[in-house]
Image (spheres, rainbow, N blue to C red):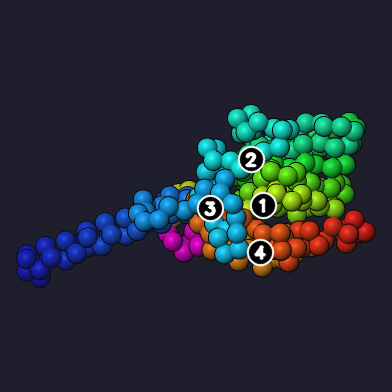
Amino acid sequence: MKAPTIARVLTGVLVSQLALGAFLVISDLAGAGFRMPQFGPQMPRLSDPVRPGDQRRTFSPDRDLPPLSPLRDPDDLPDRLTLTQIEGGTWRLEGGIAAGDGARLTEQISAAAPPVETLILQSPGGSVQDALALGRHLREQGIATQMLEGEFCYSACPYLLAAGSPRSIADGAAVGVHQHYFGESTLLPAFVAVSDIQRGQGEVMVYLDEMGIDPMVMSHAMTTPADEIYILLPEELARYGFTEAETEAAAN
């Protein structure tokens, strides 16, 4: 092979490797929730009213929260789940869902005195796997979940809400879903990342079915980017079983 031909081949290989590397980096960033800056009309904020057909909001709960009830100042919302007693068997579970919170809160709830009968939820979400693990414990213990007017349950938090037996969602409470990132953020081939995402979504759908929630709610989650949130309307909460299932869950 002549020298110029070899040089062209090597150049082509180098360009291909650089292109592949760039693709994997972009794919990894996208999976982690990174998106390129966008121009044009700005998406409504979380604090803006939600109407049918206008339910997606920029997801930035740390700086843009909906109005809250007097029970909690938004500046005081903890970074990870925190369990506090309100009165009798009614407790609050609020804060971000961090890795390890599933096992940690399962232990705390099991040891709580008086026993936890109802959990008032407020969380921007976090670790899906921990939410599923804790949710199954809530269902096993027959613990009710509740949301108060003006408070929110986003991202992985609705999986805790779904576990309630029964569930109660006040008018004006915000329940929101979006895409999740499953697995660790590493530079892996795209087919491996897709496999992790598909497996994780499958686990979530099985869990929702166990809790009496229509897995079709995932159609909204899977089509909403991780830096946005889709707020479920009251009729959607009823359609997917979050509110309709109250009586049935209590009887089981």
Circle nearer the viewer, 1 or 2: 2
Residue picked out by circle 1:
175
Residue 67's label in the rendered image is: 2
Magenta residue check for 59: no
In the image, 45 versus 89, the foreground residue is: 45
Does the magenta-highlighted stretch encompass residue 191? yes
First reached walking from the N terminus: tag 4 or tag 3: 3
Residue appearing at x 10%, y 68% in the figure: 5
Tell me which secondary structure the magenta stretch mostly adopts. Answer: helix
Check disc 3: other Cα within 10 Å, few if <14, some if 14-19, many if 20+: many
Check if mark 4's residue and mark 3's residue have beta carbons within 8 Å: no
Query: Label 4 vs label 1: CA separation?
Result: 12 Å
Secondary structure beneath disc 3?
A: strand
Q: Quadrant of residue 95?
A: top right
- Residues rendered magenta in the picture: 189-196
- What amino acid type should be assigned to the residue bearing mark 3? Arg
Q: Label 3, on which residue?
A: 57
Q: Secondary structure at mark 1?
A: strand
